[in-house]
Each structure stands twice: as structure tokens, then as C-alpha cells.
Image (spheres, rainbow, N blue to C red):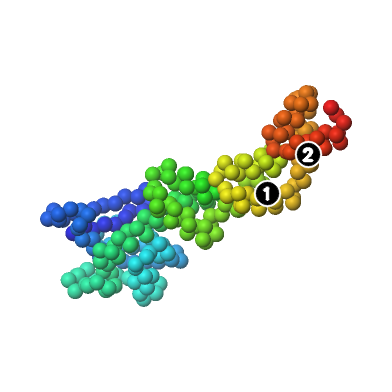
Amino acid sequence: MIHAWLNVRSTVSVVLVEDSSSASAKSSILRMIIRGIKQILLGVYEITPDAGSAFFLRADYLSLVTEDRLLPYGYGRLDVDLEDLSGLKEGDTGFFNSEETEDLYKASLLYAVEKAAMSYLNRAEHSRSSLYSKLIKKGLEKEHILTVLDYLEEKGILSDRRFASAWLRSRSIDHNEGRSRLSGELTARGLDRGVIKEALDEYFLEHDEEELCRKALKKLLRVKKDGEKIKAALVRQGFSFKMIQKIFSETNIL
């Protein structure tokens, strides 16, 4: 027999106790007997098995075990009488068979990934791409990361569109840049073209691009005198050559 459970704090750890008579760990039967189940947040449960450490999971990540199996009597704590485990059978409160144990185990792993993701999202908006990269660097499973990112997007917790708007607001504090430069920066951060277009359209409703070009020109004039070099610098900052020519003709500086 194998008892499998999860200790979720800052890292994921698995404790396996194998029956030496088993032909292989993969073919061994998994079973979990639960002595305590407590809902700590909406849809989040603390599971205390008959042996090993308590772990946590979100019911939304379960595919086999239904939420009413976790709290059949509503809110509170459910305790199973450990004095007589011999009478427990599949489907009974507190008893989970091989497939159900795997389902609980996977849900707990996914919740651990969600907690890691939220540690970043609680600090700042992230794009899906940047959050994925950070979670991969923590050594988490790709499949689990993708499942959690899908869930966070579905719930509106993770949003590329919201990230793009937040990034543009922050960028505008110290930079005067045109559409093409900003589009390139957002593309480099893994955002979809449709998302980028929507964010930039909204941004330039509030920030006149020609005015940004004038401000950029004024700043460049402090350090450059050659007209062609200034124009090249403005192109690199994302302004169209047509717009640059127009601003130059208005200023009569060079």
C-alpha cells in the first residue's frame, strides 16, 4: 500500500510509504483515509489524513471527488472515528480509493502552484507569459502551471489586458514613446497582438502621440544638435517618420 499526501507551505514535498511486497510503486494501490476536513476559505479545504501532514486544496481543481464528499455536513470540521476503520468502504465519508486519492493529490499540487502564482500577483500585475516564466524557474510542473493560469484567467485574477494597461501607465511616467516602440515592448512581454492593439488604442485616447513626440524632441535637443540623428532617435522611440517630419516643420528649430 502507498499512502500519499502533501505538505504545502512554501515548497511541495511528497511522502511515500511503499509496501515491500508490491511489484512496483506504479502498480501499488493508493488509498487515503481522512480524519479531518475543514473549509478554510470559499472552496479551499484543509485535509488531515490518518497519517502524515495536513495539506490544502481547492475544490475547483478536483475532477473526480465532488465537493459534497469533502464537507457532506456543511461548514465545520468532520472527524472520522479512527477506533474502527475496518468498516470503511469506498464512497464512505473519509475513505478515498486509488483514483480519488490521486485526484486529491493532484488538486493539492495545483493549489500549491496557485499559491506561488498569487505571491507574485499580490505584488503587481503580471502577463501570463511573465508569470509562467517565474513559476517554471521555481521548478514547478508545466502542466500544473498551465492549468492554474487558465483558472486564474477564467476568474479574472490574471489578465494580459489589465497588465498591458498597467505597464503603459508606468512606462509613461519616465518615457515619451510612440506606438511602434510601445507595441514592440509589449510584444516582447508575450502579449497577443489583439490585446496590444486594444491597450494602445485606449492609451492614445488619453495621451496625444504628437504631443509625446514634441516632448521627446525637446528632450533630445538638450543633448543632440544634428537634425538627422535626432530624427533617427525619434524613430527608435516609436514615432512614425511622417509624424516626425510634421513636428520638425512646426518647430523651425533645425
Residue 148, can we see it?
yes
Q: Specify whether 82 is left or right of 179.
A: left
Q: Which residue is drawn at 75% across and 36% down?
A: 241
Residue wearing tag 1: 200
Reply above or below: 212 against 125.
above
Residue 124, can we see it?
no
Q: Residue at x 65, y 46 (%)?
A: 168
Please, which residue is most extreme toward the bottom here? 73
**For the residue labelled by badge 2, is the local secondary structure a helix, a strand or a loop?**
helix
Please, which residue is most extreme toward the front here? 242
What distance separates the C-alpha of mark 1 from that of mark 2? 17 Å
Residue wearing tag 2: 243
Judge by depth and name the residue closer to the eye, 240 or 31: 240
Give the number of callouts: 2
Quadrant of residue 6 within the rendered picture: bottom left
Query: Looking at numbered disc 2 in the image, what kind of residue is underneath it?
Result: Met
